[in-house]
Image: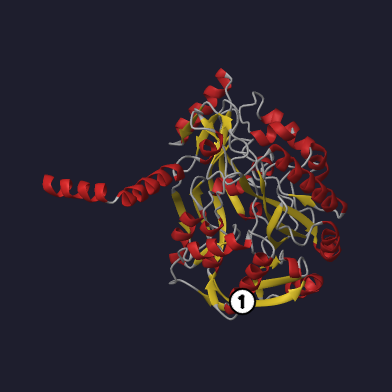
Amino acid sequence: MNLSRVSNNMRVLHKKPWFLGIFLFVFVLWIFWNIPIEKRKYGLSQSNMTTDYTGLLPERIKGIVKAGNRTELQKIVKEANQKGFHISIAGQQHSQGGHTYYKDAVVLDMKAYNKVLAIDEQNKTIKVEAGATWEDVQEAITPYGLALKVTQSQSIFTIGGSLSVNAHGRDIRFGPMAGTVKEMTILTPTGELKKVTHNDSEDWMKYVLGGYGLFGVILDVTLELTENDIYLLHTEEIQTKDYESYFANLISKDNVAMHYARVSVAPSSFLKEMYVIDYKYTGQQDFETSLKEEHGARLGKLALDLGRQGGRWEDLFWENQKRLIHSIDGDKTTRNNAMRGNSAFMEYTKPGRVEVLQEFFIPVNQYEEYMNDLKKWLPANDQNDDFKIHNITVRYVSKENNTTLNYAKEDMFGLVILIQHGLKEEEIDHAEAIIQEWTNLTLEYGGTYYLPYYHYQTKEQFRQSYPEWEKFNKEKLKRDPNGVFQNIFYDYYF
């Protein structure tokens, strides 16, 4: 080591205390940023604390076990039955209602259980372990000219996690994710290994898919795939009152594979304007285009942060969004790239505030009337309110019956709502009151709400939304007699 150089550097720092101050500030900021969110919010002294994406439900757990192989997992489940401790299952933990942990439970971290086991190019299937992410799958299948049938608009989630909430996406032809599962290997609550399909007499899939980790561990999954088509993007601004007829025309044709829309939450056009994005078939299939990387996250985050201020900033953000969407009209993209949208720009960590998601499902033919009723009681300008709405995305979800806690009992529009509110008790209570009123309106229109998010809704609203809840619970008690698999979501609602 050159001691004279070190000595000179120390003299420079001594002579320039402002530089040392900046260095210390950046160092402290770096340490703070790497502290888990639950400890940032609830204190560094908490031991064995965990939480999920929002940090709203911190809980002390027994410990975290990283999934190794199925023999080790089987041993843990059998031991839980014998010794009476609980197990929860975790992937990326982007659920927001305590679905992945429980008080004094062992949390199985499945992220390392992530191998791609087999790709059948001819039959268009992939067999993959449940801890793999959708990005892992896309990287494996893109060279074969294959793509996913259904996934979320981001590729960061694990396969097991997405199947446990029966996710849906932008595709308007294949319905929710449960319908794309061909076969699964599961580890049951009593420690048995089972291969299951939709046609099994025991109906395991009906409870594991959309079962929120309460019926055992998904070990591996065989998924149906489709071609990695090339799409032509069509974008258009429309009035909210015209969306039902626009979509009816869209779904009646065979030239569009994927679609979503966004509704304005800007004061000057609140719930009146929308833009739509359609992915039209070109008849071409792609074998060469690489998967796109996330770019422009900082710029996107800056724009979103300005929009988060509300008022005229929200108006400016909406106008810029429309310009951006107009600029991509006529562009081409592959199916796999259409299913891996940016996510880093949405990260939000303002002290004393939280951003949460809610999703309401509305029958397709009730959309216009529903939106008109929303306008009557939601404030157009929430700049000075604690409860703020930043985004409403609309997706189509076709009817399905592959799950017990089924949110798509008929063809639905899913309205994905990004909400911000404070963390004081009265602020959370205020948000809860608004969301419960919103849920009541949704139920009046024959709709429901999505369960992977924080439980603002009452137990009565849950039971009205999911009338099969008693059957679900009866099977839970029967198939998990020792109550091995538990989470906060189940504890609250059941």
Q: Where is residue 158 in the image (x, y as percent from the top left)?
A: 53, 48
Amino acid bearing label 1: Arg
Counting every numbered tag in the picture gives: 1
Whether residue 445 can be seen here = yes
Q: Position of residue 269 (x, y in %)?
A: 75, 70
Q: Which residue lies furthest to the bottom in this view?
A: 330
Image quadrant containing the N terminus: top left
| Residue position for label 1 | 323
Q: Is residue 178 above or below residue 32?
A: below
Q: Position of residue 196 (x, y in %)?
A: 60, 43
From the viewer's perspective, is 345 left or right of 395? Answer: left
Q: Quadrant of residue 371?
A: bottom right
At 54% from the left edge and 25% from the top edge, which residue is drawn? 78
At 48% from the left edge and 56% from the top edge, which residue is drawn? 135
Image quadrant containing the C terminus: top right
At 56% from the left edge and 57% from the top edge, which residue is drawn? 346
